Amino acid sequence: MKDDVEALLQLCKALVSNGDLGEDGVRQLSEYINESPDVTESWPGNILLEPLQKAWSDGNIDYEELKVLAKLLAYILNPINDEDIELVEQWIDSLEDLNAVNNMLGDIPLHYAARKGQKEVTELLINKGADVNLQCENGYTALSKASNAVDKDTVALLINKGADPNIYDNLGWGPLHSAAGSGDFDDSSIKLLEILINGGANINALYAESVTPLDTATQYFEQPKTVSLLRKNAGKKGAELSVHIAARGNLAHKKADIEALEKHLASGVDVNMQDEWGCTPLHEAALGGQKDAIELLIANGADVNAITKNGRTPLDSFGIHQSTGEIFKKDICNDIPDFLRKHGDKTAEELKAEGK
């Protein structure tokens, strides 16, 4: 068995030439790998298929050899027992670099194995030198992919092997966000959350600068077990962490959180507190078209003509809201400019004309 596998692996490595497989060859190969429709896009199918195509087109591989290679490919993609793992291990040993990118998404073999829930292959790859925290093009790690798949066993393995639960994608989405939004219909999802939290995941990590795992857990449907676990570990909504988020809303909760906003103000938070861009809560409320929040902030002394670092007043911010269409409904928001002007708000251009 081992000699046969080694011969096949050597053949795979030796298949180099020019040309294409052709329609008939593709059809025959597909008969043996149709259970893995993404074979041409993911590791290792994208490695094997091209040399197979070239070898077939050059006539230096016959149909029976192609059939055996296709079966080997299926084993590698779907290992189900120790014998198959042996095949995978020999293939891994034939690779020059386990951390080489293998597809347009920037995936390495470890990413593919983690996404597919192939725990034994995942462990094998790590033990042989795969970088457990390497990120693909969009910032995902193997842990991110396993969390997206709600695979608690692979997640536990990755964390035990040194995976960092606080590596986020390019927008700040992390493994805990995925776990929190996966539903708490069975114990697997809750166990996944516990593994990530115990592994050091930031309970209040911000996606898109405003969405926490608790926001994710409450976005679409009730998840009482998930919410309870997050709260027990000091999880908060973005609106509870920031008066600015409370005033505007976020990607998970489009409406301003008036209750959270009231609590911020009651606790002594400066109603005119500026963020790093110079925006006050009133700027954020105007940008989000949040009339209730605007009314509350002005009633509590918000400066209607506060200027951001790029020279905008709250009225200017509402103009951006209208132009971008962000959660914009004319029947709800069309009286906001009049309300702001009634309380003395002007555009930055108008203030400049007045010499202010």
Image (spheres, rainbow, N blue to C red):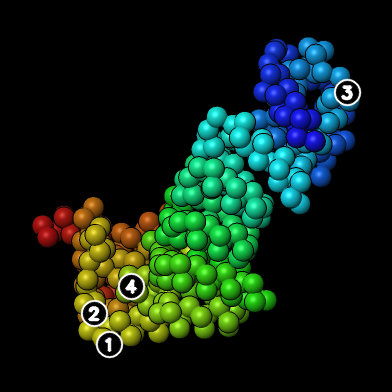
The quadrant of the image that shows the N terminus is top right
Residue 111 drawn at (x, y percent): 57, 47
Which of label 1 and label 4 is nearer to you? 4
- Residue 335 location, quadrant: bottom left
- N-terminal-most mark, 2 or 3: 3
The kind of secondary structure element at disc 2 is loop
- N-terminal-most mark, 4 or 2: 4
The quadrant of the image that shows the C terminus is bottom left
Q: Residues within 10 Å of mark 4 (few under 14, many from 20)?
A: some
Q: Which of 212/320 is in front?
A: 212
Residue 227 drawn at (x, y percent): 52, 80
Residue 18 horizontal side relative to residue 182, left or right: right
- N-terminal-most mark, 1 or 3: 3
Q: Residues within 10 Å of mark 1 (few under 14, many from 20)?
A: few
Which of label 2 and label 3 is nearer to you? 3
Position of residue 263 relative to residue 306, above or below, is below
Residue 205 drawn at (x, y percent): 40, 65
The kind of secondary structure element at disc 4 is loop
Query: From mark 1 to mark 3, how far is it between C-alphas?
Result: 77 Å
Amino acid at pointer 3? Tyr
Query: From mark 4 to mark 2, how far is it between C-alphas?
Result: 10 Å
Which of label 3 and label 4 is nearer to you? 3
Mark carried by residue 269: 2
Residue 300 horizontal side relative to residue 121, left or right: left
Q: Is residue 336 visible?
A: no
The residue positioned 41% from the left and 77% from the top of the image is: 236
The residue positioned 16% from the left and 55% from the top of the image is: 352
Q: Residues within 10 Å of mark 3 (few under 14, many from 20)?
A: few
Mark carried by residue 266: 1
Mark carried by residue 63: 3
Query: From mark 2 to mark 1, how far is it between C-alphas?
Result: 7 Å
